[in-house]
Amino acid sequence: MVVTRKRLAIAGLIIAAGFLVLWGIYTAAVHTTAGGRVFQFGLVGQAESVDPARVRNNVEKLMASTMYEPLVRWDDQTQSLKPCLANNWGYAKDAKSIIFALEADVKFHSGRRLNAHDVKMSWERSLRLSDSPVTRSLFSTVVGTEEFINGSAQEISGIKVLDAHTLQVNLTEPDSAFVYKVTHPAFWVVDTRDAIEIPPGTGPYKLDRFNAGEGLTVKAFRNYHGLRPAIAAVRFICYQDENQGLGAFKAGEIDALDSVPRSEVSALQADTDRHRLVKSPLMGFYAYAMNVNKAPYNQLNLRRAINYCIDRDLIIKNVMGGVGQPARGILPMAVPGYNRALQGYTLNTEKAIELLADTDYFKSVNPPVLQATYNTDEGHARVALALKTQLETMQIAVQPTSLSWEEYEKRMTSMQLDFFRLGWDADYPDADAFLYPLFHSSQIGVTNLTGYRNPQVDRILDAARAETQSNTERIKLLRRAEQIILDDAPMLWLVQKEMVSIIRPDVQGFKLDGLGLVNWSNLRFQEQHQQQGVEKVSGRTVPLTP
């Protein structure tokens, strides 16, 4: 075929036209509507800080997530880690070091470009400012953390800047969970060179104004390195309780409320013309822990019998307004590695009677009364009463006991409670976030508050942390540990947590992930007709040798 100038000109016009069409689609996907509507987001709870080094609750974390980012982020849809400030990462063969390769085009809200030294300084700042045992636990396997905390070193020696866009983290022991820990707010990156109360971040939104105890307003960041949000601005409003927040929603003051009262869920489901309910499974559970070293909880068969005595579905229906899933095992279904084939514990009175017969609980004239201790709260009181009712049908006496939060926390963390309410929310999106802190013997008195000790479980959990070559093998190890812990029954697992949010019908892309966070790039109003964006990187993890 002969190619003429005319044909070349026509081809050029076609290519140009195609480019303009693609550019139009792209700009529709990544730009906000001019003069766009502010997303009014109601949150139940209070926020004293949005500095990621200081956040202490889910409200503060959700607010801060608009402005700050980690090196890697959790993607609920694919149940995997995805690139964020880092576009690649990988462990050394011995699993005792990990390298992160950073994106080269990331800017802070201050306008300065991000580099690896900023990450190191930000992480050290988090550890310096935080007095949270959680933060210290997350950094505990990084070389030099102990010396940095006690003041004998001015830096965390295990965090190495190899060049402007490469960071190496050396570990004291193999820790395949560390890359998941990096999703925690303690590892979100701030511009430490800007010495202001709320430092600049790299997130899709930048600070407009923040009032402690009231709320936060953020505006879209024009130079954001990722998919620009479709919503021009977000305003968070804090409410003291769910009823107050729901009242504001019904009055048209907000577009969404993160959590509605459980007692209102059924009624709200019946009226979907004015709103929509969004149920989000969370990486958390509600349980009662038992001190396995104190009588009568030092009897394995008694602990297992208690687990078989409880009708979890009934508690969810009558006490929790249908919100939650029965916790037959340790790991909630939102956690990667959740084992759907796990039978776990369900109501089985015959099995409970058989197990109780092998204990000495009923051998005394006056069997001990189980003190079911919880921090003062109407919801916790109803759960404790439900436990009392169900256990007493099996002739196990229960006395619900309420303590102030201060007294409850003090006695719980010093292991002075024997049978007590324990709510656990994952600090990072991994099964290790439940099994290691709660049941590894090295954590007794820190986060292991039952005194549970099983050398076989310790070995398996250690082996899982050493496994970085095959995630499939790692999950097998974690599931094996979960089964052994379940058989040992150091807790009475009750409910896998869920949250029910309410949104306006024109709000699209709203959902809380397992960590209680929102993907801000997905959020939009219906009239914006935004096109869905495509991630520019695959997030495939490639082992790198330091």
Image: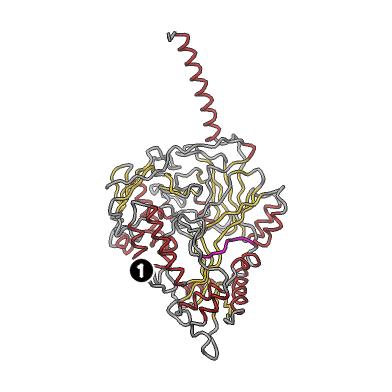
Eyeballing the image, is 184 above or below 455?
Answer: above
Give the colour scheme shown: secondary structure
Q: On the picture, is 42 further left or further right than 225?
A: right
Q: Nearer the viewer, residue 522 or 455?
A: 455
The answer to which image quadrant residue 109 occupies is: top left
| Depth order, front residue of 383/396 | 396
The range drawn in magenta is 322-328
Residue that carries the numbered disc 1 in the rendered image: 456
Q: Is 32 inside the magenta-drawn segment?
A: no
Mark 1 nearby-residue class (10 Å; few <14, some 14–19, many ≥20): few
In the rendered picture of this protein, how many numbered marks are placed on residues? 1
Q: Left of 215 or right of it: where is 174?
A: left
Above or below residue 460? Residue 83 is: above
**Element at label 1:** helix
User: What kind of residue is marked 1?
Assistant: Gln
x, y percent for residue 61: 50, 54
Q: Is residue 453 above or below residue 430?
A: below
State the image coordinates of residue 162 (x, y, percent, origin top left).
Answer: 28, 45
Q: Is residue 442 left or right of residue 347?
A: left
- Name the image quarter holding the N terminus: top left
Task: Report x, y in % for residue 66.
Answer: 51, 47
Picture coordinates of residue 516, whole percent (x, y): 53, 54
